[in-house]
Amino acid sequence: MRVPGDKSISHRAVMFGAIADGQTRVQGFLDGADCLATRDAFRGMGVAIFQPEATTLEIDGVGTDGLQPPPAAIDLGNSGTSMRLLAGLLAGQPFDSELVGDDSLMRRPMMRVVEPLRSMGARIDCARDGRAPLRIHGGVRLRGMEYAMPVASAQVKSCVLLAGLYAEGETCVIEPGPSRDHTERMLRGFGCEVRTRGKQVSLRGGSRLSGGEVKVPGDLSSAAFALVGASLLPGSDLLIEGVGVNPTRAGILDILRLMGADISEHDRRDYGDEPVADLRVRSASLRGIDIPPELVPLAIDEFPVILVAAACAEGETRLRGAAELRVKESDRIAVMAEGLDRLGIAARATDDGMLIEGGCPRAGEIHSHGDHRIAMAFAMAGMVADGPVTIHDCANVGTSFPGFVSLMRAHGAQMDEVAEA
Ligand code: S3P
């Protein structure tokens, strides 16, 4: 199996390629709605981006000072990464801009980026409760700063670092714990000096980027569904090729292995600055665990499917320290508890996690609340349930995993797409 390109890395490849000097060629780009929103945002700001095939982009970088004012509000659809990273990049431009999105994105918290940007001197208006639309006033002078982040968030870290490229002096972000480091790795790959010392990441304003080749690994967050599905389905033996295994993302592998999963890594190699491997997964009986809180930020996007694994495991699983799940594309704690309950699994939501008593999911109907990862996670539950599981509101699967159903079917899953009225 090959899964689509990594979403986080695809976003960054477009953004950094757009503001780099010279051309950037991106291979393995995720042709999903979220990354296309990022691509279109830069096209709207005058960057020529060619897409000779779905997964290849050729970007004519305009340099850090070459973006043009966007003709209208920039609509980022469902994509939190686009909005938060762009907020940082746009705060340092000479022109005004406005960022909007779909209903889910317009409900998500943006103060976490607005506050540090304002401390750097940015002028940004948002709705009173800290939500989008974000109106960013250009032409201000940003000052570099040292920012201690209250939550481990790669989006906030990346936003501040991108603003830091346009700020006077040094910008330093201090993380409370590790978050994905794709920004740091790719900026270095683009020739920008980024220093990492323990929990601190810093760069100097005025640094320039030079374009080049980016090869995007397969998305471990997408592979996660197949890792859980193959673990649960007796007799499975699946090789997923070319998956990113960056240690700041690989918490899912540790968590599933603690639950008894049989996952091995083969042919470790690098795509640019990112480690990649082929992952072999064979079915295994899973047991419930107390999920180590330090692994939570390293697996933050995988909890919907990890909780499905827990629902099918023997014994109790306890998740704590995961309050961030409440502000993802949906409130993933509430929505997962509701869905598991519909499949007859005893799941109790807590403020920052969940307690699940493993069992055998029953047939049932699930509402994804428009959340791609909820829909795909419950598709895995459906493969082992005692009858069909119907999942409603699945259009957003295409934000991160275009072709999900056909790929799963090609590897033996019994799954159909049904048009909803
Ligand atoms: C992302 C960071 C994470 C993750 C999101 C992608 C990124 O969000 O959940 O899907 O590409 O930087 P947070 O920064 O809110 O943890």
Image (tube, helix red, strand yellow):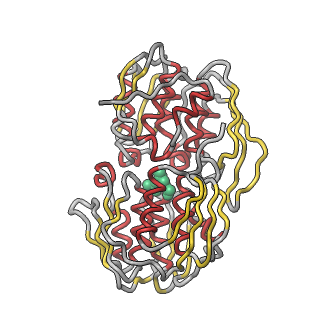
Instruction: Report the residue at 35% width, 43% height from top.
Output: 330
- In the rendered image, the vertical position of residue 300 relative to residue 308, given as above or below: below
Q: Nearer the viewer, residue 416 or 272?
A: 416
85 sits to left or right of 128? right
In the figure, residue 119 lies in which quadrant?
A: bottom left
The N terminus appears in which quarter of the rendering? top right
**Residue 340 location in percent, x, y?**
40, 26
Please identify the residue farthest to the right as the structure is shown.
Answer: 267
Please identify the residue farthest to the front as the structure is shown.
Answer: 52
The C terminus appears in which quarter of the rendering? top left
Q: Nearer the viewer, residue 16 or 154?
A: 16
In the figure, residue 392 lies in which quadrant?
A: top left
**Residue 7 location in percent, x, y?**
53, 52
351 sits to left or right of 180? left
| Number of dots carrying numbers | 0
- In the rendered image, the vertical position of residue 271 relative to residue 290, given as above or below: below
**Residue 387 location in percent, x, y?**
45, 14
Please identify the residue farthest to the left as the structure is shown.
Answer: 128
Instruction: Report the residue at 31% width, 69% height from top.
Output: 72
**Residue 243 location in percent, x, y?**
66, 46
Instruction: Report the residue at 59% width, 40% height from top.
Output: 223
- In the rendered image, the vertical position of residue 238 relative to residue 72, given as above or below: above
Specify whether residue 241 is in view. yes
Specify whether residue 178 is in view. no
